[in-house]
Amino acid sequence: MLPADTTKPIKLTPASQFTYEQLAAIYNQTRVDYMVPMPMNAARLAEYAATYDVKLERSLVATTQEGEMLGVAMLGVRKDRAWITRLGVLPNTRRGGIGKILFGGLIEQAAQLSINFHMLEVIKNNIPAYQLFLKFGFREIGELLVLRRSPLIQQQDPIAADAQRLDRSEALALVEHDRGTQPWTNQSESLFNANEVSGLRLSLADGSRGWLVYQRQKFLLTRFAFKTETGDPPKVAYALLSHLHHQYPRLDTQIENIQINDPHLPAFYEMGYIESFRRIEMWHGRPPENLNGDK
Amino acid sequence: MTKILLIEDIPDNVELVRKALSRTGYEIIHAADAETGLAMALSECPDLILLDLGLPDYDGQTLAGWLRDESILDDTPIVVLTAWPEEAAKQVVESYRCNGYISKPILKINEFIAQVNSYIKTA
């Protein structure tokens, strides 16, 4: 394929003027050469937009004047903060400034909503994207882990504990309070928007206690939120995970954007989770007081 | 005839694998997403499954879990196609009970054919 002529003017069009099929197609094409391409079909992209409050009318597709799609960038909006996601440019049109135009377009969209605080994550070692974000004034906040657990590994017996299953309303009541600063994907709004959310709460004999809230999809456990209320975080987390995976032994598990300094992490590794890849979290502007979406 | 199921969503990669393996005489069948891949694996009983990790409906790891959960496919080698670093690819292979991985992009055709042959011969 010949490189597109990116010397011609680029047109930005709201993503809401395209179908999810079209948006999934352009998004997938922008990432074919990524180490972690994470393609999506239309249904997955629609679910992604709904869960993460992506506003298609504020998201942008870059095209030539003739309408040839060149790239895409999406904007999530929650109260006083915005999230930049799914930014990508077709491989054969990169280095022509399209990413910069899309990115600047999203910042402008957020400004129109009087939002001056922006968040994003970039896959670690995606140097061109990272450099672009630095140029726009973003700063690195920390590293995030994407973890995976196969249902094929040997199951453990659940740790002896007083365990209680939580229905959706009980689970959501826990996530909306006092969880500290969270990346966009793990803020309470994401769980409120998700289907099939439930939870576990348990107490150990030594008085330790904590809870775990999760989304159960057809084949996957995902979108975890967890907290140790009292006691040693790895110990409480291990007990919670042992009960969760005992309850759903045949489900694969993927959790995203766990902060690298999260004190519960040793329990995940002990339970057989493996690291898929890392992201860098970056912010721009002054953060609002509450970055979990607490009520 | 030896039958290979290629589960891969990117048309250019499908074409590349088809071309690369055209001289081997293997029959290549193709699925572009995980659900179709599972259905074809069960109906076609291939001699080898080449599995891309990035698929548009469910990812390749989830699919590997489904495939390995099917007793009819117990003896079918599953080989992951991935651009992930070696350590991450090895972890996926081990935890999802795959038989190995082949690094993407595929640059050396003869090397790729030899890798595929090695899994067929040990099947």
Image (cartoon, coloured by chain):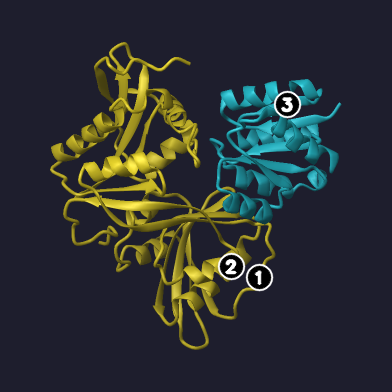
Chain colours: A yellow, B cyan
Q: Nearer the viewer, mark 1 or mark 3?
A: 3
Do discs 1 and 3 share a chain?
no
Q: Are marks 2 and 3 in contact (CB under 8 Å)?
A: no
Q: Is residue A57 visible?
A: no
Q: Are marks 2 and 1 in contact (CB under 8 Å)?
A: yes
| Secondary-structure class at tag 3 | strand
Q: Nearer the viewer, residue A104 or B64?
A: A104
Do discs 2 and 1 share a chain?
yes
A212 vs A58: above or below: below
The answer to whether A104 appears left or right of A72 in the picture is left
Residue placed under numbered mark 2 in the picture: A271
The answer to whether A160 appears left or right of A99 in the picture is right
In the picture, the disc for residue A90 is none
Whole-angstrom CA distance, mark 1 to mark 3, is: 38 Å
| Secondary-structure class at tag 2 | loop
Q: Earlier in the sequence, mark 2 or mark 1?
A: 1
Residue type for callout 1: Gln
Which of the chains bears the disc numbered 1? Answer: A
Residue placed under numbered mark 1 in the picture: A156
Residue type for callout 3: Ile
Label 1 environment density (alpha carbons within 10 Å; few <14, some 14–19, many ≥20):
few
Which of the chains bears the disc numbered 2? Answer: A
Residue placed under numbered mark 3 in the picture: B29
Residue at image location 81% in from the left, 22% down from the top:
B25
Do discs 2 and 3 share a chain?
no
Whole-angstrom CA distance, mark 2 to mark 3, is: 37 Å
Which of the chains bears the disc numbered 3? Answer: B
Residue at image location 55% in from the left, 45% down from the top:
B84
Residue A170, x across and y down, in percent: 41, 65
Residue A26, x across and y down, in percent: 42, 26
Residue type for callout 2: Met
